[in-house]
Amino acid sequence: MIHRSPFVLGLHHNEHLFDQMSGAITLLPSTAVPSNESKQISKSCEALLSFRNSIVSSDGVLRQWRPEDPDPCGWKGVKCDPETKRVICLATVLIKCEEQMKEYTVSPRAMRSLPRHKLSGSISPDIGKLEHLKLLALHNNNFYGIIPSELGNCTELRALYLQGNYLSGLIPSELGRLLEIEYLDISSNSLSGYIPPSLGKLDKLSTFNVSTNFLVGPIPSDGILTNFSENSGIMRCREDRYGGLRLR
């Protein structure tokens, strides 16, 4: 008759229990650990809700932006990349947001005919967390306060439309990080100070409008800014609300 020690019996018993539990244990990573896609959605949702919470009044266009909605990609004014679920477009006007750059431009005449949504409030610094944003169009509203320097984190931006608001303060030098940008319009605000020389790094810039502000000084002779005519500078541009600094 073979006698087994209590230790050996206990070991075999524990192994049997572990075998029974292992199946449940192996299921945990797939259910408990969020996917990259869900992490991206959550991050975008938080940034957009912060943007919404900075709005003190509107015509109700952001009413459907609800915290209990886990996916912001269907919210009005928001467009996401269909594969990565990253927010690539935030527009409060009727602008098409597609990959082709021709869809990122709107003529000055069309801008004047687009509906306003009377968004009033500051632009949340959390907008800078939307790092894959390609188009930001918040023009012809009632935004006030500064242009957040955190916009410099949105390094994939190709078009930035903030004209026709009540933004004040300096033009952030951090906008010089937007190396993919082609269209930059911050005209018709209450911006002051100088045009940052850092904007000279924006080699792809083709439209640059800073008219109808309270800017001072010459156009910096740095990089791409040397391609803009001094004769179409700030003082002259104030005569035309939709004028600006254009490439020669």
Image (spheres, rainbow, N blue to C red):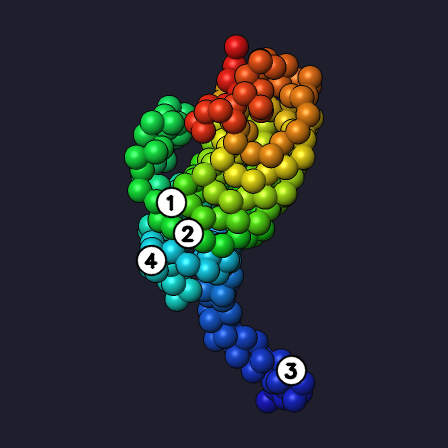
Q: Are marks 2 and 1 in contact (CB under 8 Å)?
A: yes
The three-letter code of the residue at mark 2 reads Leu
Q: Are marks 1 and 3 in contact (CB under 8 Å)?
A: no
177 sits to left or right of 85 = right
Mark 3 — residue? 8
At 34% from the left and 45% from the top, the residue drawn is: 116
Mark 2 — residue? 119
The three-letter code of the residue at mark 3 reads Val
> How far is the residue under mark 3 from the one under mark 2?
73 Å
Disc number placed over residue 144 in the picture, else none: none
Q: Position of residue 78 (x, y in %)?
A: 38, 46
Disc number placed over residue 92 in the picture, else none: 1
Q: Earlier in the sequence, mark 3 or mark 2?
A: 3
> How far is the residue under mark 2 from the one under mark 1?
9 Å
At 67% from the left and 85% from the top, the residue drawn is: 7
Can the viewer see residue 158 in this picture?
A: no
Q: Earlier in the sequence, mark 1 or mark 3?
A: 3
> How far is the residue under mark 4 from the one under mark 1?
11 Å
Residue 164, compared with residue 240, is above or below; it is: below
Mark 4 — residue? 60
Q: Are marks 4 and 1 in contact (CB under 8 Å)?
A: no
The three-letter code of the residue at mark 1 reads Thr
> How far is the residue under mark 3 from the one under mark 4?
71 Å
Q: Position of residue 167 (x, y in %)?
A: 54, 44
Q: Earlier in the sequence, mark 3 or mark 4?
A: 3
